[in-house]
Image (tube, rainbow, N blue to C red):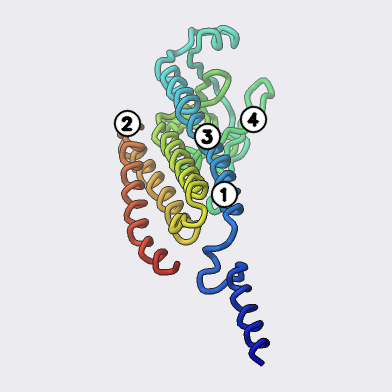
Amino acid sequence: MTTARARAHGTGEGSQLGGLPGKDGAGRRPPGRARFMGVLLILLSLIPAALCYVAFAAWLTADRELYRDYQAAEPCPARATVQVQVANDCLSTRPFTVVKTVVKTGRNSTFEATLKDEDAWRGVVSFGDAGPLLDQLEPGDRVTATVWRRAIVVLSKDGVRQNSAGAPRDELQMNAAVGTLAALLAAQAFAFGALRLARPRGHEPLTWNPYGKRLLLTSIGVCFGVGLPAVWIGIPWWAVPAVAVPVVVCAAALMHHHLRPRAAGGV
């Protein structure tokens, strides 16, 4: 009996020392999976980092130059050919007839006007909304289109003008909002990955649920919550990252401070 009890007791100790999960079994798991996820997160952080670079270095710069060129464009000389108009980068006006319009609001909003000219040209012009001109147009109406770089940028009738969807706009704040969001996502993924490499057994509370999810939603809300009003008010684009980044950093610190005791108590 003594020998049997000793064997049973020895078996119980051996199984616990062998790594079977007990109360703290999660802390004894091999760190390989956490390190693998760390490397994966760091590699994934390169995607939003590249998007951030494109948004600020290419997209924002190109849109700014395009808008400046559009604002500086002057009316084309009378009777200038299309080649001359394109070469001079000037604004030309042409008469068109409305064939039909599409004003559809809702989940898949559509705002379009189909136009034709005297030379049998026929095309569709898209708009961002219905007003102030598109919802007043009827088939057969005569309109005047302003053309720049072979694209209709403005449609007018009886003094009422409306920019098309292709008209250059000074809305660099939204470019900055997208770029800032991409930078924050890259920083979040890199931080989560680096911590898993440095501390594979103790990276809480930097986990997806709830910290990562809350931080992602906060970043999205702050970036577009700052970017949209910046467009409406007309403040400079650089104000978007200047405001959004400190707000998200403060929110991340507060959430980390709130969740850290909970994570420590669960270990």
Label 2's element? loop
- Residue 44 appears in the figure: yes
Q: Give the structural element (helix, strand or loop) at label 4.
A: strand
The reply, left or right, for residue 232 in relation to residue 10 is: left
Residue 237 coordinates in the image, percent (x, y): 36, 32
Label 2, label 3: how far apart the Cα atoms are: 21 Å
How far apart marks 1 and 2 lie (CA) works out to 42 Å
N-terminal label among 2 and 3: 3
**Mark 1 or mark 2, earlier in chain:** 1
Q: Earlier in the sequence, mark 2 or mark 4?
A: 4
Residue beneath disc 3: 51
Q: Judging from the image, what secondary structure is the residue with disc 1 in?
A: helix
Q: Which residue was labeled with disc 2?
A: 236
Viewer-side residue, 164 vs 240: 240
Q: Residue at x 48, y 39 (%)?
A: 182
Whichever of callouts 3 and 1 sits on the residue coming sooner in the sequence is 1
In percent of width and height, residue 231 lies at: 36, 38
Residue 136 visible in the snapshot: no
In the foreground, 137 or 102: 102
* Within-10-Å neighbours for mark 2: few <14, some 14–19, many 20+: few
Q: Which mark is residue 123?
A: 4
Q: Earlier in the sequence, mark 4 or mark 3?
A: 3
Quarter of the image for the N terminus: give it. bottom right
